[in-house]
Image: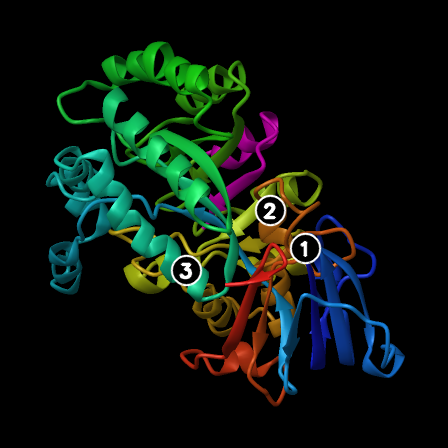
Amino acid sequence: MRLLVTNIATLVCDRLARPRLQGREMGELETLDDAYLMADDGEVSEFGLMADLPTEGIRADVTIDAKGGMVLPSWCDPHTHIVYAGSREGEFVDKIRGLSYAEIARRGGGILNSADLLHSLTEDELYEQSMVRALEIMGKGTGCVEIKSGYGLNTADELKMLRVIRRIRESVPMHVSATFLGAHAVGRNYTKPQYMDLLLNEMIPEVGREQLAEFIDVFCDEGFFTPEETARILEAGAKWGMRPKIHADELAASGGVKVAIDHGALSVDHLERITDGEIDMLRNSAVMPTGLPGTSFFLNLPYAPLRKMIDAGCAVAIASDYNPGSTPSGDMKFAVSLACIKMRLLPAEAINAATINAACAMGQSGSFGSIAVGKRANFYVTRPLPSIDFIPYAYTTSIISRIVLNGQPV
């Protein structure tokens, strides 16, 4: 199938097809005004100026007139937990009353509460609930997403979650990556040693045998898993071909950044409490630091110092962290706005953090995250806008008029 988009006021494109941007590069956003875009069989095949588009002899199965709107690459969201059961608005009220995230967890809420709710659902029920959220984020412009398990906390329920993620992948045109996060917390009725044994000797081998996850993640933070435990879990996952990703430095400087670098993690996420020494370590590594501004917004936590990290020469990505407890939103446009407003990123930096660098945090920047010849044709068309900077500026305004995934309108 051939798709043609015409009359694009501004096309955000990527002639160099760079796999990631860091430091000053993050402020570079290549654009082409008064442009067209062509996609063949799901991939971008060419783009250029409308003045150079032949008036005759162009065959297209579908033509979209952008009518002076912009075209941008679909958002990439490298950190979500959208497979979950129910909701946790009761804890939202507890937070308003002054309880901290850690206090709620100690009272048996938080992640364990979600695990209890998920246990009561069948796989079909969980799939139906989770598909609503998958379609929601797709409608907000996300075209590539990572989904974690981690609300099962026993073998059967973790596998149930991962099977639901697989079913979502088969049901939507978004690209979906799966992450095993059995080490999200210690499951109910287990001691830490018992749960570690379950992770290492039962959960990980079973996930590996069924090939249910591309990545393995650990909540390496105060009150959860230590750096030593994290290393053991990542090493066990690596034996089954699962690449590491790590939650770190959300509640305290946890030591997770060093573990991520030592084990070649794709990304290290949260980083609200990252130290200057860890920033120095990340600057010269291939690990993608990923900030989650929605989490800081919802929990009233400090924001990850992405401005400082970019100024130090780091690459950074942002993600939604969509989950029932700390970030019940998968709106990546809002995450981009928060990155500008609260983290002091310039609009171009925030957009790059939510597209090409976010794709890199999933190991997918060769196919997603920018509009480049040979990449998947995942993009959205906006209504006419005054400038690209308007996108994060108008933080609740809906801007999308058409969505294209794999070269087809959706």
Secondary element under disc 2, as helix, strand or loop, is helix
Is residue 273 positioned above or below 235 on the image? below
- Tag 3: residue type? Ile
Structural distance between the alpha carbons of marks 3 and 2: 31 Å
Mark 1 near mark 2, Cβ–Cβ under 8 Å?
yes
193 on left or right of 239: left
Secondary element under disc 3, as helix, strand or loop, is helix
- Tag 2: residue type? Ile
Tell me, for residue 279, which label it has, or none. 2
Structural distance between the alpha carbons of marks 3 and 1: 32 Å
Q: Which residue shows up at 45% across the image and 50% down it?
A: 172
Mark 3 near mark 1, Cβ–Cβ under 8 Å?
no
Any part of residue 150 in sight: yes
Is residue 225 positioned above or below 1 on the image? above
Query: Which residue has dot 3 on it?
Result: 137
Query: Which residue has dot 1 on it?
Result: 312
Within 10 Å of disc 2 (Cα), the crowding (few <14, some 14-19, many 20+) is many
